[in-house]
Image: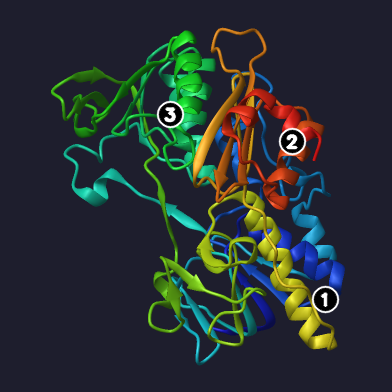
Amino acid sequence: MAEKSFKYVILGGGVAAGYAAREFAKQGVQPGELAIISKEAVAPYERPALSKAYLFPEGAARLPGFHVCVGSGGERLLPEWYKEKGIELILSTEIVKADLPANTLVSAAGETFKYQILIIATGSTVIKLTDFGVQGADAKNIFYLREIDDADKLVEAIKAKKNGKAVIVGGGYIGLELGAALKINNLDVSMVYPEPWCMPRLFTSGIAAFYEGYYANKGIKIIKGTVAVGFTSDSNGEVKEVQLKDGRVLEADIVVVGVGGRPLTALFKGQVEEETGGIKTDAFFKTSVPTVYAVGDVATFPLKLYNELRRVEHVDHARKSAEQAVKAIKGLEKGQSVDEYDYLPYFYSRSFDLAWQFYGDNVGDTVLFGDNNPQSPKPKFGSYWIKDGKVVGAFLEGGSAEENQAIAKVAKLQPKAENLDALTKEGLAFACKI
């Protein structure tokens, strides 16, 4: 098969790839210099839409509506945009071999791609229950959500199983967002997770109590402290029951599993330095191989604010790390210096009429402030995390744009807060005066 050569190759077709392409176009790229290789069949899009508006029963989001970079208020990059810029979109192409010393990638179809500079933007893959040998986990209508194909299959099942029973396995990001989406579609929803409260990697028990109460008020059943250990299916091979470790059995027409992801780094094992589950990079996302950069979920990078190496799985970092890598690549070419990546961790979610944002680090002591009654018509509450007498993290539900900016500023500046009682009383006002 013919070999194709490019100056720059972005491997992966998700959010990071789209934002990197935009930055290349901004910095100046010649037609034919840049290619994006993606196993998906569509141009890069804003992945968060899949667990939110894509699943709405009315006014649902569909492509081309949410191609990058609309998620951050930018221009929507349609397939034509890539053509106009001379950027080659190589879609429906899975790379099965990467030979970094030879600057070569090989596809499942046997095509060879050469590059001078590679940006690894492969993202994560979902962890599947079949990976653990869970009995019956290969039944039909057990879904995972990562790509647009997954979302399309789930949409079809929602239509086919109208007013049916749905079981969500997992109480993290995907679990909470999909629990809400399926409830809005009039399904009878149960959520199952082993932890003592939802989103335990970020939420305190106080924050989680609000969301669990709110979901319960919406009619979602929450089952904590147990896991799915098996599934039974009917004569068509479709799932019909979820067996829990505690002995309970739940009826199910649809099961959605959200139990985490793994960074897609297997292609590069032994060829590049790794750290804490990701590919180790510097503050410009350059790896231990000088012609190779890694961005988004796969990168373990120096988080300047906390002086430590971290891997961050979130769309905000995918966007910003991609832009930083391209600035660094072009800066080197032009002999211009680029500032080190100085990232403030940021996470957000929306479900039902709720919307929360979190900035900073969730370590140390916590305080909870505001109205966190799940039955309030307009709840607004938050938390601060305090370490060594300084506020290092801030969370806010129901905040305005200005209030969200205020908590971001607090997390970045890390003001002193010695008295936790006073901080609780002051609440949001503490952030707004900084």
Q: Residue 140, percent across and down?
A: 30, 34
**Which residue, given by chain and number where applicable, does mark 2 sit on?**
431
Picture layout, residue 432 above or below residue 319: above
| SS of the residue under disc 3 | helix
Q: Is residue 99 above or below residue 68?
A: below
Mark nearest the camera among 3 and 1 is 3
Horizontal and vertical percent position of residue 37 = 59, 67
Q: Which residue is depicted at the point 68% across and 79% down?
A: 8
Q: How many angstroms separate mark 1 from mark 2 (CA)?
A: 42 Å
How far is the residue under mark 3 from the one under mark 1? 49 Å
> Disc 1 marks which amino acid?
Val
Comes first in the chain, label 1 or label 2: 1
- Badge 2 marks a residue whose secondary structure is helix
Q: Which residue is mark 3?
A: 205
Q: Residue at x 61, y 79 (%)?
A: 286
- Check disc 1 and report the residue beneath it: 29
| Quadrant hosting residue 162 | top left
Mark 1 and 2 residues: CB-CB less than 8 Å, in contact? no
The earlier-in-sequence mark between 3 and 1 is 1
